[in-house]
Image (cartoon, helix red, strand yellow):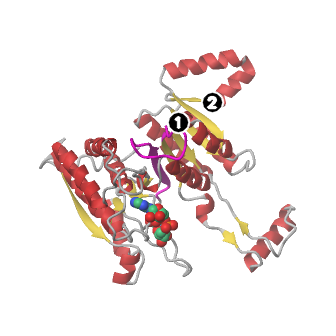
Amino acid sequence: MIKPIFSDLNHIDLPFITGDGIGPEISMATKKVLEAAVTKVHGDSKSLSFIDVVAGEAAFKATGEWLPQSTLSIIKEKKIALKGPLMTPVGNGQRSINVQLRKELDLYACVRPVQHFPNVPYPVKRALLDIVIFRENTEDVYRGIEYEAGSKEALKLIQFLKDEFGADLPLIDSTSVGIKPISKEGSQRIVRSAIQHAIDNNRKRVSLIHKGNIMKYTEGMFRSEGYDIAETEFKDHIFSMRIYEAIKKDQGESKARSILEQAEKDNKIIVNDVIADAGLMHLTMNPTCFDVLVLTNLNGDYYSDASAGIVGGLGVAPGANINPESGCGVFEATHGTAPDIAGKDLANPTSLILSACMMLDFIGWKKVSQVIGYNLRQCFEEGILTSDLAPKGVSPVACSSFSSSLVKKISYS
Ligand code: NAI
């Protein structure tokens, strides 16, 4: 799935957007960790250097543009980037830079792994989540097709829907309308990349999450296209619960169950579907029933934030926006610029460090990401926690001390 253009290279130039707010602190921490881990694993045989590029407030101050063309060109040329959080100004019509980047580079898959780390307090009874979320990044509400109540566009659209399709929209003047486009191609490619990820990473289950019981032609089509892709393109690797249901109906439950058991023995990935609302309940009550999740854009937003909350919050929530076909990826923490703690050396750099690990996996430098991941877990095991995670009675460490501890562990491991 991923173009092997990076793994053969002995040197990688990584465009790095430091970001606003806590961006400089967590970026500095992440750079030190990356340098230490690459040296540890590859010595002088492989190297990584950073190309500092700007976006967000820092770019606006320097160039008058929020997302300079020069930044985009470098990312397009190098294909990858690591990105700190960016401030999006509110109320001046400026589009989110993150959304612009995803659109410009067609980064259709938003990938968010969620796992619990030792000693990190969590709000639910048991935080056993170890999942990867694949959120579709270009359609659904991200298309932004929405018209305000009373605007000429809304009035015209409502009138059209009423006249042409007999739509039941009685409150013409006071109704805002939005369009939720979901395409077959968009659904197919995100499901394809989620199943491929499950195969490449020995995952056991891929769940298609949808609200197809209510929205049959958008969410419902996402489900059916997902099953079609699974059953045709991945038939040697998966067992489809849609087929299970068909066998159960035709030949009875015990027959269906025995075929499912055989598929599990054969290490087939189970592809099932879950209604979005019930799935959110299972996420908190029965978290081990999930493994890889694939979702439309809005559902994916809810699931990724809800699951980040379950394992302790934004400080441990990495993310990637990728296009597996083009080999392009922008890797970023899922939190924002945290203006309330910016410049105080309080930020938790873990999300950006874990995002850097996703970037390393993406380019095929898996040993480096394993070294970082292992030692990061050791830091947590020893109760080295920044203030967002430290429970009462545990003294938190600063952002810079956290990265120094991690660098030390990597260097002497
Ligand atoms: P936020 O994520 O910046 O902060 C929410 C809360 O989480 C704050 O209390 C903050 O202190 C805490 N927090 C966030 N990251 C943390 C970290 N690494 N360590 C410790 N605590 C952390 O969200 P908010 O306040 O809604 O947004 C602030 C700005 O960030 C806005 O301009 C927004 O547009 C931008 N933003 C950028 C994103 C991106 O670049 N991917 C994503 C979300 C927001």
Label 1: how many Cα within 10 Å (few below 14, some 14–19, many 20+): few
- How many numbered discs? 2
- Image quadrant holding the C terminus, namely top left
Percent across and percent down for residue 349 are 34, 57
Q: Which mark is residue 241?
A: 2
Q: Residue 97: in sight, yes or no?
A: no
Percent across and percent down for residue 111 are 46, 50
User: Residue 126 colored magenta?
Assistant: yes
Q: The residue under label 2 is which amino acid type?
A: Met
Seen at 22% across and 49% down, the residue is: 37
Drawn side of residue 70 relative to residue 226, left or right: left
Quarter assignment of residue 398: bottom left
Q: Secondary structure at mark 1?
A: helix
User: Residue 189 colored magenta?
Assistant: no
- For this rendering, which residue is in front, 284 or 386? 386
In this picture, which residue range is highlighted in magenta?
Answer: 107-130
Label 2: how many Cα within 10 Å (few below 14, some 14–19, many 20+): some
Seen at 55% across and 45% down, the residue is: 294
Percent across and percent down for residue 82 are 34, 60
Which is nearer the N-term, disc 1 or disc 2?
Answer: 1
**Which residue appears farthest toward the front when viewing the image?**
393
Note whether 159 is above or below 243 in the view shown. below
Q: Under 8 Å from ligand 1: the CB of mark 1? A: no
Percent across and percent down for residue 214 are 75, 48
Q: Which mark is residue 233?
A: 1
Seen at 56% across and 55% down, the residue is: 301
Quarter assignment of residue 87: bottom left
Q: Under 8 Å from ligand 1: the CB of mark 2? A: no
Q: The residue under label 1 is which amino acid type?
A: Glu
Q: Residue 240: in sight, yes or no?
A: yes
